[in-house]
Amino acid sequence: MKSPNLSQDKIKIPKHLAVIMDGNGRWAKKRFLPRKFGHRAGAENLRQFIRWCADFSIKYVTVYAFSTENWQRPDDEVQSLMKLIVEFFGKYNRELEEEGVRLQFLGKIEDLPEKSLATVKRAEEESKNRNRITLNIALSYGSRQEIIRATKAFTADVISGNREIEELNQEVFSSYLYTQGLPDPDLLIRTGGEQRISNFLLWQLSYCEFYFSDILWPDFKKNDLKEALMEFSDRERRFGGV
Ligand code: IPE
Ligand code: IPE
Ligand code: MG
């Protein structure tokens, strides 16, 4: 007999799930493979993961794919990641369409090489009317960069007379972030064993529940997601109240 608390109807579903997909390099190392094979396996897992999220009726998923700090990695690793973006959308655009996945990219994407930038812009444009699930991919993303960018944009609006300083509040500030229009994540999963944020969504995670898993990202499967959702369901969120 199935244990009752394993049935899906007992699971509280987050509206917005954020994921730090960490551990690709170690996954490859364990197999004596170059790191880029880990990234390929990680991309393959993301493709499945988005389907599992849709199965659980999660509306918004934001994944950390490449940070502003990841540009410091060796050239060949950065290059293979940039190539992987082009390959991924070439291969899976049709499938993402069938799944009703809307794509949005968060971050300083103007720093991407031309071909990768064109690919992500096209993927975003082509998917804008899909509405089963929204997949936000944080790419060349860093939260401190995002906050400084927002501050500059607000200041520019004040200088040009479009805004008054007094108008600035949490809601207005949020509208200058890459995540404008999205609800704040209610659950963050980080795979790969590290317990840190690594410059991801500092503002947006203020009241988010954190879930850390030792499983390396390419090995994180549907049942592992379900376990995270079950733990989330048992958390008591107080938002500073009693
Ligand atoms: C996460 O995996 C993916 C990216 C940062 C692009 P890593 O590449 O950080 O894998 P580990 O942490 O070295 O195992
Ligand atoms: C965070 O992982 C970024 C992504 C998963 C894209 P990192 O591997 O870059 O983070 P650190 O270096 O462990 O903090
Ligand atoms: Mg890592």
Image (spheres, rainbow, N blue to C red):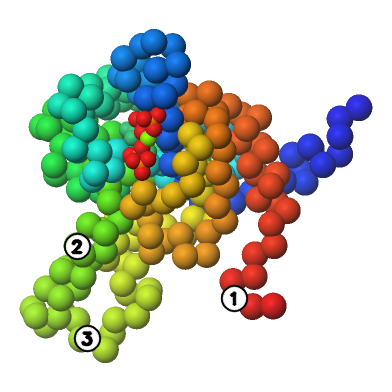
Q: Position of residue 203 (x, y in %)?
A: 38, 64
Residue placed under numbered mark 3 in the picture: 165
Q: Viewed as shown, does residue 215 lie left or right of 161?
A: right
Q: Residues within 10 Å of mark 3 (few under 14, many from 20)?
A: few
Image quarter in which the N terminus is found: top right
Q: Residue furthest left?
A: 160
Q: Position of residue 198 (x, y in %)?
A: 36, 49
Res. 118 visible in picture:
no
Q: Secondary structure at mark 1?
A: loop
Question: Marks 2 and 1, how far apart in space?
Answer: 29 Å
Q: Please name the residue shown 14% across and 44% down the image.
A: 110
Q: Position of residue 149 (x, y in %)?
A: 19, 62
What kind of residue is marked 2?
Arg
Between marks 1 and 3, how big is the CA–CA gap? 28 Å
Looking at mark 1, is its residue's CB closer than 8 Å to ligand 2? Answer: no
Residue 147 position, x and y percent, is 26, 64
Quadrant of the image occupied by residue 164: bottom left
Q: Secondary structure at mark 3?
A: helix
Check disc 1 and report the residue beneath it.
Answer: 240
Depth check, mark 2 against mark 1: the one in front is 1
Q: Label 2 belongs to which residue?
A: 149
Q: Where is 173 relative to 223, above or below?
A: below
Q: Secondary structure at mark 2?
A: helix
Could you tell me which residue is drawn at 12 percent across and 32 percent down?
Answer: 113
Left or right of 60 in this view: 223: right
Q: Name which residue type carries label 3.
A: Ile
Q: Nearer the viewer, mark 1 or mark 3?
A: 1
> Could you give the CA–CA distance between mark 2 and mark 3, rounded to whole angstroms?
17 Å
